[in-house]
Image (spheres, grey):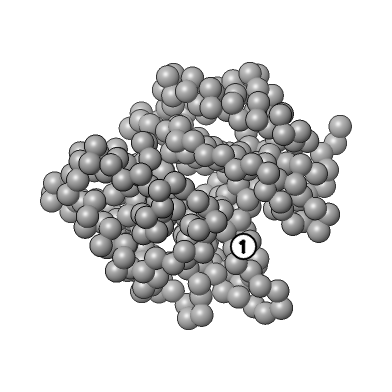
Amino acid sequence: MRLTAIDIGTNTILMLIADIAPDGTLKTMRDEHVIARLGTGVDRSRAIAGETIERTLSFLRSYRQISDECGSERIVACGTSALRDASNRDQFIRLIAEELGVGIRILSGDEEAELTYLGAISEFQKPGKPEYFSVLDIGGGSTELTFGVNDAIQKKQSLDIGCVRLTERVLKISPPSSLSMSQALNEIRAQVASISPLPSQTQLIGVAGTLTTLAALDLQLPTYDPRRVSGHILTFETIQQIFNQLRIKTIDEMLVYPQILPGRADVLLAGIVILMEVMKRMNADRITVSDRGLRYGMAIRESFAPPPKN
């Protein structure tokens, strides 16, 4: 079966088109990414703005066309933090269904964490022995942390802090002042206080734009290459060095780096600070980057689901 999985996040919209074999393995046909900023202003107003809806509809219309051209047999779409929080999410979902014939399912924080975990570990699992994973997903509106053994999840945490939310609340100007950085740290530390140290023999994996951008920066990639990004190991020292370089730059100065995309530059510092504070709480000195995540987990789940009724 050829399946399309669309992850409608607070900052990005990601689309995976994959062939699913009878044994559940995936062959990627297309993997698309766009920074749509669905969550702009949602933390403040609790509603998605009209212009944001139009912009998102345009991106999703393009995705629907690509999906049809690829001969996808089924489309599944899920929304995360911004849609969980938006008071007008039902109107948004109805509009997308009417315009594009695509239904959107809103995931809880726990569901998001579970599916992201399944997607992230899918490229690191080795058959025949128990492997311990912890998957960190720094999103635009929330941050998920999931622990498991192979594909069996043991513990999930969803934190009400993300790179877009933190930027809109505190880190509004780049470079940020010492006061705003102190305020950001206080907010993050209040959220991560419940995180425990990383268990021994556990591999920490990081997904989403903050991690993939850091990997691309560390690798000095002239153009993004998911094959080199996935599996790249970032040490805490390297992350801190990159943060120190970017901490004093304006948005325009950040955009000089080819690895930092428009729409990512203004929220990158917030994402890095969240990452560093989580790693400190976990006593983790390194993290492995994965280019996979929620969309892959959605596809894996669908591969084991019964076929839809006609």
| Residue sticking out furthest to the front | 222
Residue 206 placed where, x, y %? Answer: 47, 60
Quarter containing the C terminus: top right
User: Seen in the image, is 144 located left or right of residue 79?
Assistant: left
Residue 11 placed where, x, y %? Answer: 43, 38
Quarter where residue 190 is shown: bottom left
The secondary structure type at the circle numbered 1 is: loop
Q: Residue at x 49, y 36 (%)?
A: 34
User: With respect to residue 37, does 246 lie above or below?
Assistant: below
Quarter where residue 72 is shown: top right
Q: Would residue 138 be visible to someone looking at this image?
A: no
User: Seen in the image, is 114 located left or right of residue 222?
Assistant: right
Mark 1: amino acid: Glu
Q: Residue at x 34, y 51 (%)?
A: 271
User: With respect to residue 131, does 224 lie above or below?
Assistant: above
User: With respect to residue 161, does 287 lie above or below?
Assistant: below
Q: Residue at x 44, y 24 (%)?
A: 52
Which of these two is toward me, 123 or 51? 123
Which of these two is toward me, 116 or 175? 175
Residue 202 placed where, x, y %? Answer: 51, 75
User: With respect to residue 200, does 164 lie above or below?
Assistant: above
| Residue sticking out furthest to the left | 178
User: Seen in the image, is 89 located left or right of residue 77?
Assistant: left
Q: Which residue is mark 1?
A: 123
User: Seen in the image, is 125 located left or right of residue 273?
Assistant: right
Which of these two is toward me, 118 or 110? 118
Residue 102 placed where, x, y %? Answer: 67, 28
Q: Residue at x 32, y 55 (%)?
A: 272
